[in-house]
Every structure is written in C-alpha cells, then in structure tokens.
C-alpha cells in the first residue's frame, strides 16, 4: 500500500500527470456545481504543463541542481579510495563499433572510467540492482567498463539497490568491508545533490563528480517552443526536488534507515 502511494506521489512530479489529476478534480468540481473552482483548476492544469514544456523554463528549473557542484576534469580530481558510479545513465553508445572516451562527455560510465584511467582511485564500485530480466544493471555497467579500458579486476559490483537510498546504503556497506572511506561519486549533475546527500548520510566522505547533460542551446525556437523533451526534463527536475526534500525529512525524523534485505 505504501509503495503504491509512493509511486503515485512520484508520478505527480511529471507535469502532464499532475495536470491530468487537476483536470479530473476540475471535472468533479463542475459536476458538483462548483463551476468557478472547476474553471480555476482547469486553467491551472493547462498552465502547469504548458509552462514546463518550454525548454528554457525546464533549463531554469534544472539549473540550481545541475550547477550546485562544479565539473572537474579527471586529471584535476583529488585522489580517493574508490570511484562510485551510479546506474541509470544511457548505454546507447555501447552499440557503436568504435568508442572514444573523449566523445562521451555526458556518460556516467565514461566519466568514471576517465577518473580511474587518470589514477584517481584504485577501484570502481558500480551500483545498480537487478532488472526484470534478472540481470543487474551493475553487470551491464561492468561489461561497458571493459569496452573503455577498465579491467574486471578493478571493479566491485553492488547489485542490490533499487533506488538512490539503496545505492548509498549498500555501497557504504560494501565500502566498509574493504576499508573504503573517501569516494569520488559519479552521477548526473541533476541527480548529484540528492545522491551526495544520501551517501554522506551513509557515512562516506564524498567528492562529487557531476556528469553534465546536454543543455538547450541555439535558436529562439529551440529554447522557447514547447516540446515533449522539455516536459521530460522538467519532470526529472521536480522528481529530484521532491526526492531531496524526502531525504532531508526522512533522515531528520527517522535517522538513516538500516540496510534492508532486497526482495528475492
């Protein structure tokens, strides 16, 4: 029950879904003859999705998250005990016949590989749980790492996590078994504030290594004409804001939760 409620609340961060819920409320209000309230709700519903479908507005929304931590080139990173790469990035580049790290500026795995190849840490921890096919994301990430020059001997796999909190808890557990304290945390820039918060709460000394995502540039039309991609980007940002608030509240009121066993 709680899981279903949580999933519903997360879905509300996607603007069209919240707009749909507001439209349903508007219809109910009209049916109850609260016509003025219904009209207000309908206008709010349409305005909400319209606003966040504008690429420039989506970029403004994401900026406080993406720019919180500066981007640092691999050779300039401080040394650490391990590099932690979180799952969830795109693996489309694996289909290429030839792969060059310098071309993968927006890849988490490539960023982690560059840090390892630069000698910033001796090991890379790949954190990603099992999907519907029974194969963990960490396993897929390990295969990808091999293609960009990181040997299996340098990898540790965390395969139990289901969300960012699990990433932090189970990675901290694995790190503790190998006397790892200071980590270079690699994830997307928009996800970094929430991820780094959970990892620090789990007791790790975190150095943020944010991976930038493509930004909207170019003509006026590209920046101001509504698009489905902008809605998706806005939804991701709202999800991160909501998740960050949830993390602060959960730790403030409950403390860091224990390591729960994942479902079989």
Image (cartoon, rainbow, N blue to C red):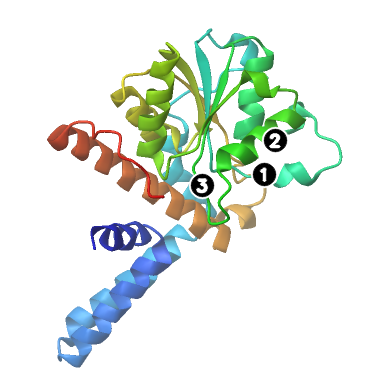
* Residue 206 visible in rendering: no
Instruction: State the image coordinates of residue 95 (x, y, percent, origin top left).
Output: 78, 46
| Front residue of 175 and 28 | 175
The answer to which quarter of the image holds residue 5 is bottom left
**Residue 148: quadrant of the picture:** top right
Query: Could you say which disc has been placed on residue 91 in the image?
Result: 1
In percent of the image, x 34 and y 71: which residue is there? Answer: 45
Residue occupying the point 58% across, 52% down: 223
Q: Viewer-nearest of labels 3 and 2?
A: 3
Of 166 and 115, nearer the camera is 166
Element type at mark 2: helix
Q: Seen from this angle, which residue lies furthest front? A: 264
Q: Nearer the viewer, residue 42 or 104?
A: 104
Give neighbour class at mark 1: few <14, some 14-19, many 20+ (Cα, 10 Å): few
Position of 54 with respect to 15 (left or right) is right
Residue closer to the observer: 209 or 135: 135
Q: CA distance from mark 3 to mark 1?
A: 16 Å
User: Looking at the image, is mark 1 or mark 2 earlier in the sequence?
Assistant: 1
Where is mark 3, residue-wise?
130
Q: State the residue at coordinates (36%, 70%).
A: 19
**Residue 56 appears in the picture as rendered:** yes
Q: Earlier in the sequence, mark 3 or mark 1?
A: 1
Tell me, yes or no, whether the two marked residues, 1 and 2, touch with CB atoms within 8 Å.
yes
Q: Position of residue 61 (x, y in %)?
A: 42, 46
Q: CA distance from mark 3 to mark 2?
A: 16 Å
- Select label 1 or label 2 by which is in front: 2
Cα gap from disc 1 to disc 2, whole angstroms: 8 Å
Q: Which mark is residue 144?
A: 2
């Amino acid at each position: 029950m709680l899981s279903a409620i949580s999933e519903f609340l997360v879905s509300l961060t996607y603007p069209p879904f919240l707009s749909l819920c507001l439209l349903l409320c508007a219809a109910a209000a009209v049916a109850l003859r609260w016509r003025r309230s219904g009209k207000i709700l309908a206008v709010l519903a349409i305005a909400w999705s319209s606003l966040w479908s504008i690429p420039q507005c989506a970029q403004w929304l994401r900026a406080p998250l993406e720019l919180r931590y500066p981007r640092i080139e691999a050779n300039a990173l401080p040394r650490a005990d391990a590099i932690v790469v979180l799952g969830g990035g795109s693996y489309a580049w694996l289909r290429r016949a030839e792969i060059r790290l310098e071309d993968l500026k927006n890849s988490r795995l490539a960023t982690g590989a560059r840090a390892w190849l630069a000698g910033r840490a001796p090991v890379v921890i790949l954190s990603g749980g099992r999907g519907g096919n029974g194969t963990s994301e960490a396993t897929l990430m390990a295969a990808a790492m091999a293609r960009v020059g990181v040997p299996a001997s340098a990898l540790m796999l965390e395969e139990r996590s289901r969300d960012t909190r699990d990433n932090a808890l189970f990675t901290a557990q694995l790190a503790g078994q190998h006397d790892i304290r200071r980590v270079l945390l690699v994830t997307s820039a928009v996800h970094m504030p929430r991820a780094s918060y959970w990892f620090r709460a789990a007791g790790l000394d975190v150095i943020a290594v944010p991976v930038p995502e493509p930004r909207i540039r170019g003509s006026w039309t590209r920046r101001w004409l509504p698009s489905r991609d902008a809605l998706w980007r806005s939804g991701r940002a709202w999800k991160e804001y909501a998740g960050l608030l949830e993390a602060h509240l959960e730790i403030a009121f409950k403390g860091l939760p224990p390591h729960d066993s994942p479902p079989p």
